[in-house]
Image: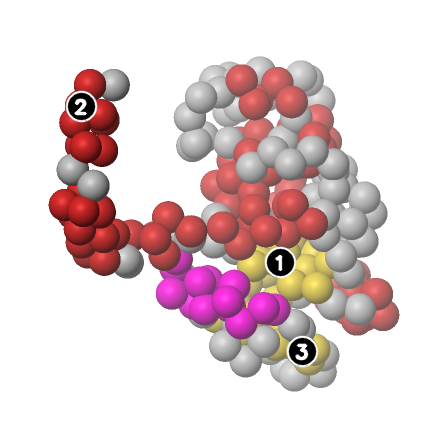
Amino acid sequence: MDKFTRLRSTVVPLDRSNVDTDAIIPKQFLKSIKRTGFGPYLFDEWRYLDRGEPEQDCTHRPLNPDFVLNQPQYRGGAILLARANFGCGSSREHAPWALQQYGFRAMIAPSFGDIFYNNAMQNGLLPVVLADAQVDALFARAAADGVMALDVDLEAQTVATPDGALSFGFDISPFRKYCLLNGLDDIALTLRKADEIRAFEAAHLQAFPWLKRDAAAA
């Protein structure tokens, strides 16, 4: 996955609480056996005026002009600002896939669904938890400015407006921080030990040679 170090981007304000994973990527898209192509269907039921289906060309679908992703000033924004309990509901990994493939790299909210929070970081997305009052301040600044940018610095663990008027620290586990800074998901972490794994397997088969025969017979 891509490394996350520091990001400056337009903020996309999604002023809703309890956004569940079915709203992020509706259930019909889970039929796809691919891990790519979910970005066009992000927030499908809110973003479009018709019902989307897997593999559908979204180029000419009718858009909901009131939904934030369809408002031109927010196009290209890579930071999503949301309310409490973002990503609640089912554990589908398609939700962070859709967010990441749309172009988001960071999300800010007072809280996230537990499974979604971990799935996001496994896919190179940074979920930033701030206090309710801090999120309120960011929403207020976004409304006042019309378009607001933020700097998200993972190394320093800070979120700040470019002018420094608002600046907040956030917590993240040292392990997850290390993985994001270095672009490592669980598979990549395991593969860094590939030589040791192969050496162990060779020594194990030498000590217990019948395991090789049993495996070949199976």
Q: Residues within 10 Å of mark 1 (few under 14, many from 20)?
A: many
Q: Residue at x 45, y 69 (%)?
A: 178
Residue type highlighted by circle 3: Gly
Q: Name the one closer to the observer, 61 or 130.
A: 130
Q: Which residues are magenta?
A: 172-184
Q: Disc 2 vs disc 1: Cβ atoms closer than 8 Å?
A: no
Q: Secondary structure at mark 3?
A: strand
Q: Which residue is mark 2?
A: 216
Q: Residue at x 76, y 57 (%)?
A: 111
Residue 86 pos. (x, y %): 73, 48
Relative side of 85 to 149, left or right:
right
Which numbered dot is residue 169?
3
User: Cα distance, mark 1 to mark 3?
Assistant: 13 Å
Instruction: Please name the predominant secondary structure of the magenta segment in the image.
Output: helix
Which of disc 1 and disc 2 is earlier in sequence? 1
Q: Quadrant of the C terminus?
A: top left
Asked if residue 72 lies in the magenta stretch, the reply is: no
In the image, residue 62 sits, relative to residue 151, either above or below, namely above
Q: Residue at x 70, y 56 (%)?
A: 81
Which numbered dot is residue 127?
1
In the image, residue 13 sits, relative to residue 97, either above or below, namely below
Which of disc 3 and disc 2 is earlier in sequence? 3
In the image, residue 104 sits, relative to residue 29, either above or below, namely below
